[in-house]
Amino acid sequence: MSNYRRDRVSGGTWFFTVAVADRKSDLLIREIDILRDAVRRVRHDWPFRIDAWVVLPDHLHTVWTLPADDHDFSTRWRLIKSHFSRALPRQEIVSRSRQRKAERGLWQRRFWEHRIRNDRDYRAHLDYVHYNPVKHGHVTRVADWPYSSFHRDVSRGLYPNDWGGGVDLDGRFGE
């Protein structure tokens, strides 16, 4: 078994990318209510703050801040994926390696995480999260994508509703 080295910082702020196994799928937006419920359930028992979130058809990006005495984001992702998967009927194709481990075939096994280092890094990742639907060609304006914390942040005065034009988001973050 692989031994992944995770950056374990209690109370840290993290950027994540999590994807479904079938990258041509629209599963996450088709079943958005199930995903929202899974996140709500996990946050009840394993609190974390959602600083930014966007759900696209086949993947999601989010920025979380964990409680001051906690660094365990992996358990939170395992539980979110598990709650989501259990709420759906078994219709996906499951590889032999997943069958041997009694896994579903909905999610990619791993996720990408990056610990936010400073205010500039934080802002860049929030912008990246919110701009992602435009980057992937789902909409031409950030405000037109319904599955995003952008709308919450507009109502809080953190972004203007017409934000997103002329933003330089080349995807190079962190290391």
Image (cartoon, grey):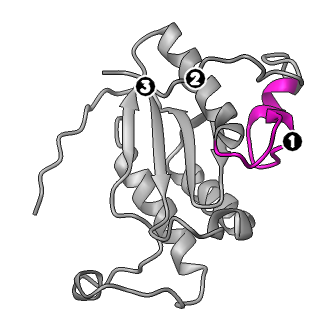
Residue position marked by numbered label 1 in the rendering: 144
Q: Element type at marker 3?
A: loop
User: What range of the chain is rendered magenta?
Assistant: 136-154
Q: Find the distance from the CA under tag 3 to the CA under tag 2.
A: 30 Å
Q: Quadrant of the N terminus?
A: bottom left
Instruction: Give the side of residue 17 with respect to residue 162, left or right.
Output: left
Q: Is residue 168 magenta?
A: no
Q: Amino acid at mark 2?
A: Leu
Q: Is residue 77 above or below residue 161?
A: below
Residue identifier under label 2: 169
Q: CA distance from mark 3 to mark 1?
A: 35 Å
Q: Nearer the viewer, residue 132 or 118?
A: 132
Circle 2: is it few (<14), some (14-19), or many (20+) Cα within 10 Å?
A: some
Q: Is residue 17 above or below residue 9?
A: below
Mark 3, mark 2: which one is toward the viewer? Answer: 2
Query: Considering the numbered disc 2 on the image, is that residue within a helix, a strand or a loop?
Result: loop
Query: In this orientation, does residue 83 appear?
Result: yes
Which residue is depicted at the point 48% across and 15% down? 121
User: What's the residue at 30%, 21% (across, down)?
Assistant: 175
Task: State the residue position of label 3.
Answer: 68
Q: Position of residue 43 (x, y in %)?
A: 57, 49
Amino acid at circle 3:
Ala
> What number of labels is visible?
3
